[in-house]
Image (spheres, rainbow, N blue to C red):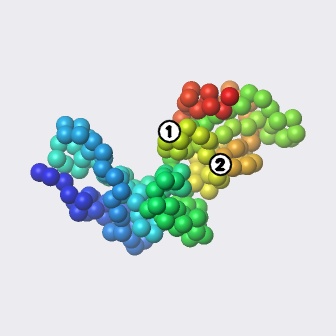
Amino acid sequence: MSISTEDCKRAIIASWPAEFGEGAEDFKRVSKKGKKGEPIVRLFYHRTLPLKAIVVEESGAIVKTTIKGLGLFDLNDESQADQELADNLWSNESYAFYEKHQNLFEPADFYFYVSDKPDEFAGDAPYWFVLTPVAYFDRVECQYDQEVSHLIGSHLPDDCGESSSCTFASSLEPQQLREELLKRGFVHSEKFDAFMDR
């Protein structure tokens, strides 16, 4: 049996969290990846809310539907359609939606880098680390430079604050900090470490 876009949209509606209110049907398919005999992954973006849906098909059946946050870092700078959508993500309404629904993004969506060099002027929180979205770094191999605490704040260690875009201060020493971030589900990447250590 062939899975259609309408089948996928029905799966999205069935997975739609009630806390999001209306809008379950307002998704547009943006990509389809996978070959015959492999899982086929379809990606949908919501037309007005900062959300994306990922629908996975295996052996002619939908086996998984995930609805999660859509960030500016997910969008392609070279796509006109993505840039039109980016205007919505910059809005106060999107920012409020992110803050209200803190589980739209998971720690596994972010790489981390912990510096071994304390900031001698930082007082009680001299150690620092950087987060960058996995999707962004894997696509452009560069650090993200926008604020992310409103997307991931509920998953961070209690004493952390975003001192500048994607950079956080902490009182934990570097090795403790690495262990704590890994325990919370953030992702260590040797490639991202190498980029930050250049």
Reading the image, the residue beneath label 2 is 145
* Residue type at numbered disc 1: Asp
Q: Is residue 23 above or below residue 53?
A: below
Apparent side of residue 129 relative to residue 42 in the rendered image (left or right): right
Q: Position of residue 64 (x, y in %)?
A: 30, 48
* Residue type at numbered disc 2: Asp
Q: Residue 138: which numbered mark, if any?
A: 1
Apparent side of residue 195 relative to residue 11 in the rendered image (left or right): right
**Which tag, 2 or 1, sits closer to the chain's start?**
1
Which quadrant would the C terminus be assigned to in this image? top right
What is the quadrant of residue 27 in the picture? Answer: bottom left
- Which residue shows up at 58% across the image and 50% down it? 152
Q: Using the rendered image of the protein, determine whether residue 198 is visible from the camera's viewpoint.
A: yes
Q: Is residue 77 above or below residue 193?
A: below
Apparent side of residue 183 relative to residue 62 in the rendered image (left or right): right
Q: Position of residue 14 (x, y in %)?
A: 29, 62
Q: Position of residue 74 (x, y in %)?
A: 49, 51
- Which residue shows up at 23% across the image and 50% down it? 62
Apparent side of residue 106 relative to residue 21 in the rendered image (left or right): right
> Which residue extends farthest bottom?
22
- Find out whether the residues at labels 2 and 1 contact each other: C-beta distance under 8 Å: no
- Which residue shows up at 59% across the image and 40% down it? 142
What is the quadrant of residue 95 in the picture? Answer: bottom right
Q: Element under label 1?
A: helix
Graded by Cα atoms within 10 Å as few (under 14), some (14 to 19) or many (20 or more), the crowding at tag 1 reads few
Q: Position of residue 29 (x, y in %)?
A: 33, 59
